[in-house]
Amino acid sequence: MNTAQRIYELVQAMPEEQVNEVLDFVELLRHKATFKVGSEQLSKIPKGTLTGLRGIAPTD
């Protein structure tokens, strides 16, 4: 039995309220993983690329 199957079996025995909490947690983990990948992509931008734009927008 793989991990996903084990989680499925455990969740089936839970009340709906707890199942919703599990779903929220899984979605949070997925979002964090997506954000981490996005952050890694941003860190690949060469330093100084965006600093040339400094000062073009008014700062009131």
Image (tube, grey):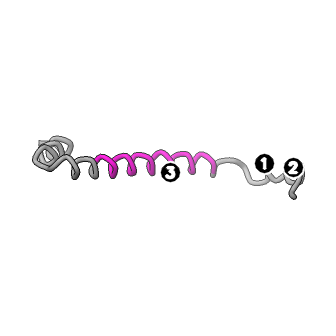
Q: Main secondary structure of the magenta part?
A: helix
Q: Which residues are magenta?
A: 23-42
Q: Secondary structure at mark 1?
A: loop
User: Label 1 belongs to which residue?
Assistant: 49
Q: Rate crowding at label 2 as few (under 14), some (14 to 19) or many (20 or more) other CA atoms within 10 Å.
A: few
- Say what amino acid the circle numbered 1 marks: Thr
**SS class, disc 2:** loop
Left or right: residue 48 compared with residue 22: right
Residue at the image position 45 percent from the left and 51 percent from the top: 32
Say which residue appears at 89% left-offset and 48% top-offset.
56
Instruction: Tell me the mark number nearer the camera, choosing from 1 and 2.
Output: 2
Query: Circle 2 is placed at which residue position?
Result: 57
Q: Amino acid at mark 3?
A: Lys
Task: Compare marks 3 and 1 and give the one earlier in the sequence.
Answer: 3
Label whose residue precedes the other's in the sequence (3 or 2)? 3
Q: Nearer the viewer, residue 51 or 19?
A: 19
